[in-house]
Image (tube, coloured by chain):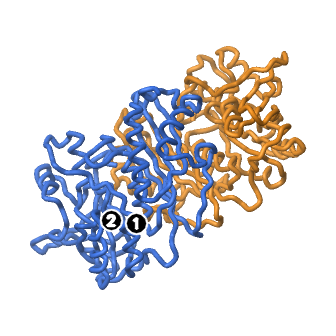
Chain colours: A blue, B orange
Amino acid sequence: MEKYISLAHGDGGELSHRLIRDVFIEAFGDGNAAMFDAASVAISASKIAVTTDSFVIKPIFFPEGSIGKLAVAGTVNDLAVSGAKPVYLTCGFVIEEGFPIADLRRIVTDMANEARKTGVKIVAGDTKVVERGCADGVYINTTGIGVYEANIGCSLEFEEGDAIIVSGTIGDHGIAVLAARGELGITVPITSDCASLNRMLEMVLQHTEGVRIMRDPTRGGLATTLVEIAEDFNLTMKINELDLPVKKEVHGVCDLLGFDPLYIANEGKAIIVVAANEKDKVIDLLREFPEGKDAVVIGSIIGKDKGQLLLETPLGSKRLLTRLSGTMFPRIC
Amino acid sequence: MEKYISLAHGDGGELSHRLIRDVFIEAFGDGNAAMFDAASVAISASKIAVTTDSFVIKPIFFPEGSIGKLAVAGTVNDLAVSGAKPVYLTCGFVIEEGFPIADLRRIVTDMANEARKTGVKIVAGDTKVVERGCADGVYINTTGIGVYEANIGCSLEFEEGDAIIVSGTIGDHGIAVLAARGELGITVPITSDCASLNRMLEMVLQHTEGVRIMRDPTRGGLATTLVEIAEDFNLTMKINELDLPVKKEVHGVCDLLGFDPLYIANEGKAIIVVAANEKDKVIDLLREFPEGKDAVVIGSIIGKDKGQLLLETPLGSKRLLTRLSGTMFPRIC
């Protein structure tokens, strides 16, 4: 087989056919997706969850992850935090002419492995090739379909006193990717937290009641995601700076460079808002999983009228947090 | 609002939020997609069709179409030819820094209009921004979900004598786009055939029996798509050169520049293989629609053993056709 992607790999002819057969079907297996324009798949629910995400991360390989792993985990997590069980995934590739086919295989293998781990099936795909200089290596879109199981889900009904939980340390992904890009000017021993959370979150939903909402704090970081929840549901939320789980290496980099870990992207973390009397149970469940071992309560809902996120500092003062504004980090996912 | 896309429009913060609100929700309407990571939608079938496609067409605006119209029609057609009724669509944008927001609005409006026309609902979206020089304007992925209706569909069972129908003239899209790119060095009065075919194909499936398979001959053109069918089902298919519907302007360009209309992309055409005794009825039904007014029988299945596509020339000789090989036209869709 050729060593590099050429424009002809994207024109729908013989080379496209071979690329699909020798790289994609080789890794993903041959459903009916290969033969038809649309895959026909069974669904056993009257309500499904649908989500889509494009991945343009740079670099495409980074400590403990790749654009391939991320493209599966990211979309699986979007389904999982909505309370759905991820079942099917599609993938659309835009590849730059000259891209090494060995790298494509590595990416596709990562996708296949992560899909297997999470239990989703990749059922349809598409490949387009653009001229040299018209993309930066490879961009991947994944779209996910999940099903809602009866009597399991998030209530979206909040009460004062509800606890805000985060499933682990924040900022790891963003700092790891910036470091891998060589943009920090320093070497940092941090790996991305990129991981699929569906099994862990499914366990939480199955074994507890009182989960109000779950979200994954990716682009924009923990603060932006919490501001969105606060505004969408008109809640006053308060988090405590001293309770935020931040690895000391991440803290160090942030102190040094003037970043705020609250606004740095995560790719393997969930925020869970839960009734106060269930918070310990949720923490215990999360800590049974490697991805949830640092789970902790970081704050609570203190009002139901303002749509605000407050940060209580170690000195006891309260600071109003807003969405991320201005570009901190392009192409972090 | 700003005039151009900046990296901050893609970082998940305040500008991303405003872009989604002021451009996407403005055009697509506010489902629950805006508020949650995954849209929750109803589904009324035990089998669904799933398809994905990325669009990298150049130029993004062309005679009688745009990347926006194409991104909806292309995915709708992939669902429709599989026999499914398109119901939901997701869209993922990768946008180059500096892209005019007015152009983005135009594209999104085209998508909303085409979605309304076809009856699909756009339920989830995603926007990523890459640095100047890392994409060529905008790339769009659409993923479509369709439902299969009971007792309606393609049998995938073929018989000798089955008729091969194409729903109209071939090569229009490819030639129109090449001309719009200025690559032909000549002006050609040809517009793209870009159109959603779901209503027309639904009518055919509802009112006839004996439809074996339907496909849309996009990248690679009519010949490549027919070769795929022939190989996938081990059929010997024969088409007659004299019966191929080709506009005289397309013929003229092809003759002049050495292109073969059989390998040029279409974006509003369907191939339908149907039992011989139903072919007239299918042609009549197709011709009731503007997109099907030039529908015609172009050949038949002459054997069930070889996986070959033959072209009968005006002189009566038979030529074996293969998939498109080598790049004729990059970024035609």
- Label 2: how many Cα within 10 Å (few below 14, some 14–19, many 20+): many
The alpha-carbon separation of the residues under discs 1 and 2 comes to: 7 Å
Query: Which type of secondary structure does the marked residue at label 2 adopt?
Result: loop
Q: Position of residue A123 (x, y in %)?
A: 54, 51
Q: Give the residue number, with chain letter if any, for mark 1.
A: A81
Query: Which type of secondary structure does the marked residue at label 1 adopt?
Result: helix
Mark nearer the N terminus (1 vs 2)? 1
Up/down of A99 relative to A218, above or below: above
Rendered image quadrant of residue A101: top left
Residues under numbered marks 1 and 2 in contact, where contact means CB atoms less than 8 Å apart = yes
The numbered disc on residue A270 is 2
* Residue drawn at 16 percent across, 55 percent down: A250
* Residue drawn at 29 percent across, 57 percent down: A266
Up/down of A78 relative to B253, above or below: below
Q: Relative to B278, is A295 on the left or the right?
A: left
Q: Position of residue B300 (x, y in %)?
A: 82, 34
Q: Nearer the viewer, residue A300 or A208?
A: A208
Rendered image quadrant of residue B62: top right
Q: Nearer the viewer, residue A113 or A255?
A: A113
Three-letter amino acid code at the position of disc 2: Ala
Q: Position of residue A17 (x, y in %)?
A: 57, 34
Q: Nearer the viewer, residue B328 or A9?
A: A9
Q: Relative to A275, is A123 on the left or the right?
A: right
Marks 1 & 2 on one chain: yes
Q: Relative to B204, is A194 on the left or the right?
A: left
